[in-house]
Image (cartoon, grey):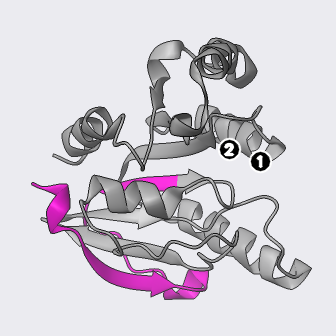
């Protein structure tokens, strides 16, 4: 299995549109503008498999990418996106509908911006992962935007802020490629 073979398969805008789970899935979750699309593009060695935008909230659907008998699943971002209350409610129902179904989730990759303390949405997602027991790893995005001392301080603070073990955290940069190999390996092992 090669992540580079991923192809866009389907976009679901409502829980009723979600495809039946008939293969293992690796799921990507995180707040709006955390870099999910950039991370997916970097992992798949593609520039525009997942649509990238500088404006938060552009991923309004759950996007499915097929890859050799498995799927990559890109959830809409949570948090500060400037969208209507109705649209945020639709996203919440869509994400809850996804997790409420019988799905073969092998790994959830939670993206957290390394430059900032975790948002309430990040903490809520971590609580959800703990309650459900879903296997997870945390990709600390945008590490390339930190200088050496900022990086050291943030990487030291994040395990306590997140309440997790340091070995769950993978510093990641879609710009430099840092963390790509480690994250790719974890995803492929989980989906195999």
The x and y percentages for residue 75 are 55, 65
Check residue 4 in the rendering and tell me which mark sits there, or answer none: none
Q: CA distance from mark 1 to mark 2?
A: 6 Å
* 181 with respect to 144 (left or right): left
Crowd rating for badge 2 (residues with CA inside 10 Å; few <14, some 14–19, many 20+)? some
* Residue 47 falls in image quadrant: bottom left
* 116 with respect to 178 (left or right): right
Q: Is residue 134 magenta?
A: no
Helix, strand or loop status at disc 2 = helix
Asked whether 24 or 100 is in front, the reply is: 24
Helix, strand or loop status at disc 1 = helix
The x and y percentages for residue 114 are 63, 34
Q: Is residue 62 visible?
A: yes
The x and y percentages for residue 145 are 59, 39
Crowd rating for badge 1 (residues with CA inside 10 Å; few <14, some 14–19, many 20+)? some
Residue sitting at x 63%, y 11% = 156
Check residue 125 in the rendering and tell me which mark sits there, or answer none: 2
Magenta stretch in the rendered image = 1-28
Residue sitting at x 79%, y 41% = 119
Q: Is residue 27 magenta?
A: yes
Q: Is residue 102 visible?
A: no
The x and y percentages for residue 176 are 37, 42
In this figure, which residue is indicated by the disc labeled 1? 121
Residue sitting at x 63%, y 79% = 60
Residue 148 lies, with reference to residue 24, above or below; the image says above
Q: Quadrant of the N terminus?
A: bottom left
Residue sitting at x 65%, y 60% = 33
């Amino acid at each position: 299995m090669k992540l580079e073979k991923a192809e866009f398969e389907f976009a679901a805008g409502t829980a009723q549109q979600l495809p039946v789970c008939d293969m293992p899935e690796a799921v990507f979750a995180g707040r709006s503008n955390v870099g999910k699309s950039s991370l997916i593009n970097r992992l798949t060695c593609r520039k525009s498999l997942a649509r990238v935008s500088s404006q938060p909230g552009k991923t309004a659907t759950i996007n499915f990418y097929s890859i050799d008998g498995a799927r990559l699943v890109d959830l809409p971002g949570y948090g500060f996106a400037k969208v209507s209350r109705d649209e945020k409610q639709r996203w919440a129902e869509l994400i809850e509908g996804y997790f409420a179904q019988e799905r073969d989730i092998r790994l959830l990759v939670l993206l957290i911006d390394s430059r900032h303390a975790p948002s309430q949405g990040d903490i809520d997602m971590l609580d959800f992962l703990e309650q459900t027991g879903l296997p997870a790893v945390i990709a600390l995005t945008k590490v390339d935007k930190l200088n050496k001392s900022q990086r050291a301080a943030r990487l030291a603070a994040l395990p306590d802020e997140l309440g997790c073990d340091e070995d769950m955290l993978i510093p990641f940069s879609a710009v430099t490629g840092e963390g790509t190999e480690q994250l790719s390996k974890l995803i492929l092992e989980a989906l195999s």
